[in-house]
Structures are given as structure tokens and as C-alpha cells.
């Protein structure tokens, strides 16, 4: 698995509030270009976000499904973008002090063409993308906290 992390000035509950609003998914996940629908019970296990990946008109419609969740602490996802592949993504929120959180995002390619790439090549592709996703998640969280 390729893992990146980032500290944010927010509680795990405040960060998770962004994650559990599935309509924000396309704003913080690099590559998700459009959210078409969010299951009503998101982020319950088995629920899905229906999204598009990539630029129009070449975008691919697919879904991301919740595999496991512990509210305000961990969410594990199955991210699909066929025919490109499927990945397992785990986001862990660790409290640091009273009002800071370390967000860890780990991703492993599970199926599709990306799986044949050597680990260092996968890491070179995933690390910058996932670091940017965490930067966006942190910015959205900060923006929500700045609202009265």
C-alpha cells in the first residue's frame, strides 16, 4: 500500500463531516470529475458514490463503495474506474491534541492494468495524487470551519 499523511487544524469529527457528505467527493478526490449520485445511507457499509473519473468527453462512469467504516476514525473504500482498475483506499483519522488530526490515506491497486506495475512505479503515481487529495480535504474542512 502507498500511504500519505497530512495534519490539519480540525478534529476527526470535523474532517469526517466532509468525508460523510458524499457530494464533496468530487471536490477533494483527485481524478473524480463529477458526482452523479450518492446513496442515501452513505457512508454505511455497502453504500456507494456514483461518480465520473477523468476529463470530459473521455470520462468513465463508475462507483466507489464503502467496505468498512468507523465514524470519525476510519473509512475503507473500494474505488472503481473500469477499465482502468480497482483500488482499496483506507482513510484513518488520528486525533493529535485537542483540535488537530493526522489524516492517513493508504491506497493499493487490487485489479486492472495498474496492478502489474511495480510497487515503486505505483507509488510514484499514487503519492502525489493522494497528497493533493489530502490537501483538498484539509482546505474544504478549514473552509467549513471558517463559516459562521
Image (spheres, rainbow, N blue to C red):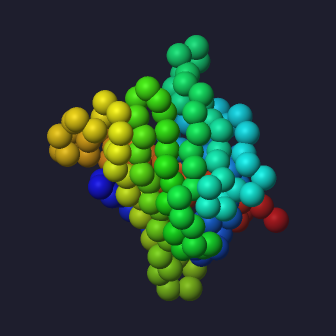
Q: Who's the residue at 41% across and 45% down the image? A: 87
User: Quadrant of residue 113 in the image?
Assistant: top left
Residue shown at the point (64%, 48%) measured from the top left: 48
Which quadrant: the C terminus?
bottom right
Q: Indicate the position of residue 66 as horizontal and vertical percent values.
A: 57, 56
Could you tell me how many numbered marks the image carries? 0
Q: Is residue 110 visible?
A: yes
* Vertical side of 12 occupied by 140: above or below: above
Residue drawn at (78%, 52%), measured in percent from left and top?
Answer: 40
Left or right of 36? Residue 109 is: left
> 68 or 59: which is nearer to us?
68
Q: Given the current orientation, which residue lies at the most extreme right position?
A: 148
The foreground one among 61 and 29 is 61
**148 vs 54, nearest the viewer:** 54
Provide residue 52's location: percent of width, then percent of height: 60, 30
Q: Of residues 64 and 130, which is closer to you in this image?
A: 64
Residue 134 placement (x, y as % from top left): 48, 54
Instruction: Tell me which corner region of the image, top left, top right, bottom left or bottom right, holds residue 26.
Output: top right
Q: Residue furthest top?
A: 57
Mark yes or no: residue 141 visible. Answer: no
Q: Position of residue 18 (x, y in %)?
A: 66, 59
Establish if 1 lies above or below 31: below
- Which quadrant would the N terminus be assigned to in this image? bottom left
Asked if residue 144 lies left or right of residue 126, the reply is: right
Amino acid at each position: 500500500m502507498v500511504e500519505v499523511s497530512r495534519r490539519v487544524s480540525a478534529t476527526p469529527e470535523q474532517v469526517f463531516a466532509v468525508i460523510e457528505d458524499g457530494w464533496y467527493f468530487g471536490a477533494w478526490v483527485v481524478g473524480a470529475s463529477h458526482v452523479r449520485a450518492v446513496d442515501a445511507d452513505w457512508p454505511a457499509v455497502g453504500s456507494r458514490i456514483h461518480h465520473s473519473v477523468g476529463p470530459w468527453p473521455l470520462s468513465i462512469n463508475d462507483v466507489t463503495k464503502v467496505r468498512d467504516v468507523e465514524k470519525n476514525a476510519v473509512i475503507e473504500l473500494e474505488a472503481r474506474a473500469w477499465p482502468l482498475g480497482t483500488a482499496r483506499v483506507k482513510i484513518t483519522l488520528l486525533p493529535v491534541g485537542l483540535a488537530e488530526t493526522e489524516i492517513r490515506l493508504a491506497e493499493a491497486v487490487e485489479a486492472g492494468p495498474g496492478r502489474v506495475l511495480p510497487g515503486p512505479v505505483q507509488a510514484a503515481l499514487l503519492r502525489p495524487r493522494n497528497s493533493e487529495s489530502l490537501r483538498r480535504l484539509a482546505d474544504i474542512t478549514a473552509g467549513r470551519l471558517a463559516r459562521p
